[in-house]
Image (cartoon, helix red, strand yellow):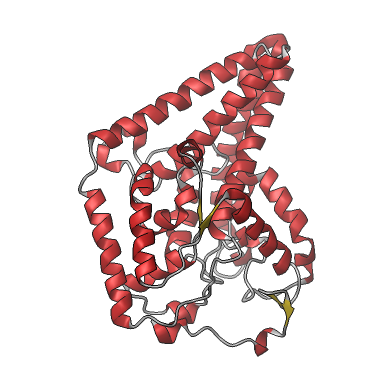
Amino acid sequence: MGKPTHLSEADIAEFGRELDAVRDEVMNDVGERDARYIHNILATQRYSEVVGRAMLMAGFLPPAWLSGVGLLSLSKILENMEIGHNVMHGQWDWMNDPALDSGTYEWDNTCPSDQWKHSHNYVHHTFTNIVDLDRDLGYSVLRMSEDQAWEPRFLVQPGIALTLAAFFQWGVALHDLEWERIGKDKSWSEVGTQARGIWGKVRNQLFKDYVAFPLLAGPMAPFVISGNFAANFNRNIWSFMIIFCGHFTDEVEMFDVEETRDEARGQWYLRQLLGSSNLDGSVPFHILSGHLSYQIEHHLFPDMPSHRYREIAPRVQAICERYGLNYNTGPLSKQFGGVVKRILRMSLPHRRKGNTLADESSVDAPVYAEAA
């Protein structure tokens, strides 16, 4: 669809006020039913982990091993997507529950929570899809925008994307080191401090999954080790697919710094909308995605309890329709196909939508700034 040029400054300001009203209504209504929801999710996650790990200890029986992997995968996916990610966004701070405190929560992942909150909550959610500012654009290893300079190394980015998917938690763990800044405006001392934090978290994760629980299993240790590896792999693939479908479908828009200079509230909302995409699916699918299947709503309201996105999505879509704005949603197969298309297209030099080859200097500059 492209960036809108039909909205006046007054239109965009009113668009922002309408979205503010949606947010205020929900945030003023949070209470007991929201607390019940997250406590039920926590109970499901913990039960799945306990039963899954127990079944892996009987892993010499193929049905027990497969069931154990399935339940442990469910536990890890719920903990990372619906619990950890959303807790660290502060969605449950209003409950004053120490177990759900964004300031102290540490998730089941190799990335330390404090580093993730900097790279994700601050950098990504502030500078969403702004080239050279949002480091989540391809996680600094993939080219995802025509405005990113092409280099020969991007020819192999389809293979890099597959590797990143398989080992996604490790890519997230290293992400906030910001290798491109080292020796410029980031010292080796800062990197060393971060690296020690990462190593401490990695050591704990490896010990838990590949030493402590295998030792408890005694002669069943090989089945526990393989089961833990399979569960981590499943969680990595799932989180990669959901996150990339929310940010890098073929319809998602990218921005440059000048387009977003002196951004007002309504313009920030507009960038979040145009830089995100949703996934259609069932309620269990949305829960397993951490409700990041409602990536548009999440980017608009990152501190709103995640299960509320299902309720407000029709209202947000209706607002977008009134303003003639693209509300990018579709099934997983369609959206992930768009992700694959973008990864392949961006691996080639000067490749733009429509499979046309053109020198980047010959393409008209975006007119969003003038419209906004």
Q: Residue at x 68, y 15 (%)?
A: 63
Above or below for 4 versus 248: below
Q: Is residue 277 visible?
A: yes
Decide if residue 74 is on the left or right side of residue 98: right
Q: Quadrant location of residue 364?
A: bottom right
Decide if residue 111 is on the left or right side of residue 166: left
On the image, the x and y values in percent for residue 157 come to: 74, 60
On the image, the x and y values in percent for residue 335 come to: 59, 55
Above or below for 205 versus 154: above
Q: Quadrant of the C terminus?
A: bottom left
Of residues 345 and 164, the one nearer the viewer is 345
Q: Residue at x 49, y 65 (%)?
A: 275
Of residues 1 and 71, the one nearer the viewer is 1
On the image, the x and y values in percent for residue 110 come to: 58, 40
- In the picture as drawn, the residue positioned furthest to the left comes out as 28
Q: Residue at x 75, y 72 (%)?
A: 151
Q: Quadrant location of residue 201?
A: top right
User: Number of labelled discs?
Assistant: 0
Q: Is residue 195 visible?
A: no
On the image, the x and y values in percent for residue 319 come to: 34, 64
Of residues 113 and 190, the one nearer the viewer is 113
Q: Quadrant location of residue 250?
A: bottom right
Decide if residue 307 is on the left or right side of residue 170: left
Q: Residue at x 77, y 54 (%)?
A: 159
